[in-house]
Image (cartoon, rainbow, N blue to C red):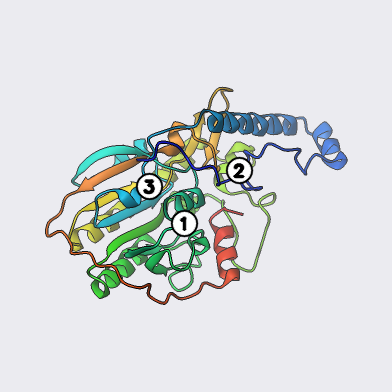
Amino acid sequence: MKEKRKDHIKPSENDIIVMKFPVHYTLSNLKKAVHDPTLFLVEGRRLALSANAAYSRLRGFNGTCEVIDEDWDNLIILDGCRYDLFEEVNFLDGRLGSRTSVGSESWEFLCENFQGRQLHDVIYVTANPHAPKLDDNTFYRTVNLLKHQWDEDLRTVTPEAMTKEALKVHEKHPNKRLIVHYMQPHFPFIGEKGQKITHAGVTPGNKTSNEQTPHVWSGLRDRKLDIDEDFVYAAYRENLELTLPHVRELVSSLDGKSVVTSDHGNLTGDRTRPIPVKGYGHPRGFYAPELVTVPWLVIEGSNRRHITTNPPYKNEQMDSEVVENRLEDLGYR
């Protein structure tokens, strides 16, 4: 368990938590706000959230979970899954507790847990577009599904594809610890409800800016989506409900001890503190409880695996354009 956070992860310029003079403070935008006073309210909420995020960083937090040092053979990561949502929806047998994540966003989680380490007894199967930023020799092998298993219609990698690939990899490398990083319940929403929402990213090759096509959480925050907040939460929940059967299939097919967790949570209209404004999404460096409290479901299994360490496998290099397009599609740009 970490006693103090590292401080080398800085908020990105795309996060709402950056405390500097915003580039959109221009005369032309001021004129727009004069004609549409609701823009002043939107900006006020953004500034309040920035202040709350800065406050959370000043307070800090201890006792965070360094996942690689925990006891498991298989670590199943559900991207952006809140603890309370998992507790409500989960039907997997096991011992459910919670952990405090080291980050409120995927890259922060990956960097804090894995960057700069040589984990050559671990295979990382992932659909997260931040994964290619890790050093090439971090894991024994990294299998990234962003290129070959990408669903063009849903703009994500489906849980079915993730489970199928993870089982294939484990069959080939049975003596390695296995991390499987599903992109759900993170949007895009893949269920019947979720596909009714026009939201998130763009299709590759059509780089529409977030100002024109906001992702679902920033759209709710800035009042740019004409949709009920509860309906969006239902779509978010639906994403998890659709994913858990595939997680059950994976866990039941693997030997050893499994843990199901998340990289970070998600704000879904929760009142943040100390300024009581609603927050949405999962901005980097915002350590609200809803963002850093994650599930930790332990499934004991049987026949603990004999783990071996070997020189790194030669991984396929991800094309930078593919990575950038996937980051767009998943709302990270």
Q: Earlier in the sequence, mark 3 or mark 1?
A: 1
- Residue position for label 2: 219
Q: In the rendered view of the protein, which quadrant contains the N terminus?
A: top left
Is disc 3 placed on a helix, strand or loop?
A: strand
Location of residue 300 in the rendering, given as x and y in whole percent from the top left corner: 16, 50
Q: Seen from this angle, which residue lies furthest left?
A: 303
- Residue position for label 1: 115
Q: Residue at x 49, y 35 (%)?
A: 287
Q: Amino acid at mark 2?
A: Gly
Q: Earlier in the sequence, mark 3 or mark 2?
A: 2
Q: Amino acid at mark 1?
A: Gln
Residue 247: quadrant of the picture: bottom left
Q: Is residue 188 left or right of residue 312?
A: right
Q: Is residue 48 left or right of residue 88?
A: right
Q: Residue at x 59, y 59 (%)?
A: 328
Task: Choose between 197 and 100: the one closer to the eye.
Answer: 100
